[in-house]
Image: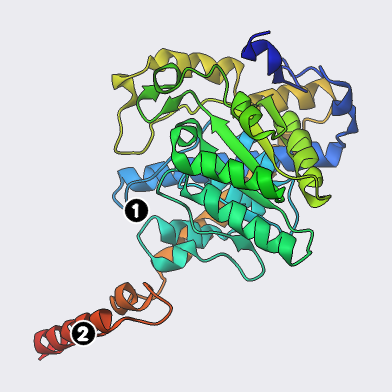
Amino acid sequence: MNMLEKFPITQYISEEGKTVHSEATDITADLVKLFYEKMLRARMMDKKCVNLQRQGRIGTYVPYEGQEAAQVGSALAVEKGDWMFPTYRDHAATMTFGHSLRNLLLYWVGRIEGGIPPEGKNIFPPAVPIASQLLHATGVAWAEKKKKTDRVSLVYFGDGATSEGDFHEGLNFASVFKVPVVFFNQNNGYAISVPMEKQMNSKTIAQKGLAYEIPSIRIDGNDIVAVYLETKKAVERARNGEGPTLIEAVTWRYGAHTTADDPSKYRDQAESDQRRTTGDPLLRLEKYMKNEGLWDEEWVTTMENKITNEINTALEEMQNYPDPSIDDVFENVFEKPTWTLDEQLKQHRSIKRGQMS
């Protein structure tokens, strides 16, 4: 049996919005509406951020349009008190888990406050170095296990991260010590400009869990029902002391790696246009809701207006936020500043006083 046969893509709702898995019937109407609301909110926020970057109002931005089901569905599967470890692309997950939209915007204008979650929310700052967050998630999960809590770590990463040493170290450690962590891979087929087949011989990401005796599954990352239910199973395994799980969510990002990237240089953008009409996560759920008699145009319009107001309020709060202090550059490096940083801070303040006088 080859690996594609060993790890088939698990699907609960088809592209046509039809139920194709018996467990899909466990999803309530209220939960389906919550899925749609959170995905729509994430997409509208993403589109707004891309527009803000093009207007020069925020810095280089990392879009995620097309990956909403993977992020929202998984984020809804964890509980308050659990830990989330995002990459620089997982804003749909963090905003679903409770991160404020204002702080998300502050992050993209380079403010230190942008990485600070609301009180009581265990969300690590976005990891820019590839795969480093897997070690953080594993370490925190190990600490929670040693403290005898039932808290779980959920960590996100792309397909390119699985070619990094930190990925293998994290999985190996988590396997040996059976720590409560869920490794959630979003496989969109490209590590920036490098297609999956050029960076690995593995046919799937899920098979990489075999070396570490970690239960692994490959799911349709654009099927939010599959994402939610399979992530919830993995979270409960971790919470019950059964150790880690590796999830490969097969998805697709429509746009560029970042707003500084041109994807047409390395992939056929016609495929993105085609996927919008067949595999889009919001469109799939819309079809399902119509098939189940749950779709309500007035409800959607009301929700869009509410989300628009929420985003505009967050933008206004970001723009009116107090000016930053350059002292933050010196004071937030170590818990206790070193003598070298103290000297640099003194020099900076001396220069600043000279400029003001």
Q: Which residue shows up at 40% across the image and 48% down it?
A: 129
Mark 2 falls on what kind of element? helix
Residue 30 in picture, x, y percent from top left: 84, 42
Helix, strand or loop at mark 1: loop
Q: Which residue is mark 2?
A: 343
Is residue 142 visible in the rendered structure shown here?
A: yes
How far from the left and from the top, in percent, is residue 349? 20, 86
Taking the view exactly as shown, the residue that stands out farthest to the front is 176
The quarter of the image holding the C terminus is: bottom left
Q: Quadrant of the N terminus?
A: top right
Give the percent coordinates (x, y) of residue 337. Answer: 35, 81
Front residue (pair 208, 253): 208
Q: Residue 131 at what x, y percent from top left?
A: 47, 44
Q: Earlier in the sequence, mark 2 or mark 1?
A: 1
Which residue is nearer to you in this view: 240 or 327? 240
Q: Which of the 4 quarters of the picture holds residue 333?
A: bottom left
Residue 131 vs 122, above or below: the answer is above
Query: Which residue reaches farthest top?
Result: 1
The type of residue carrying mark 1 is Ile
Left or right: where 114 falls relative to 71: left
Label 1 Cα crowd, 10 Å radius (few <14 / some 14-19 / many 20+) = some
Task: Give the camera-side residue of 296 and 11.
Answer: 11
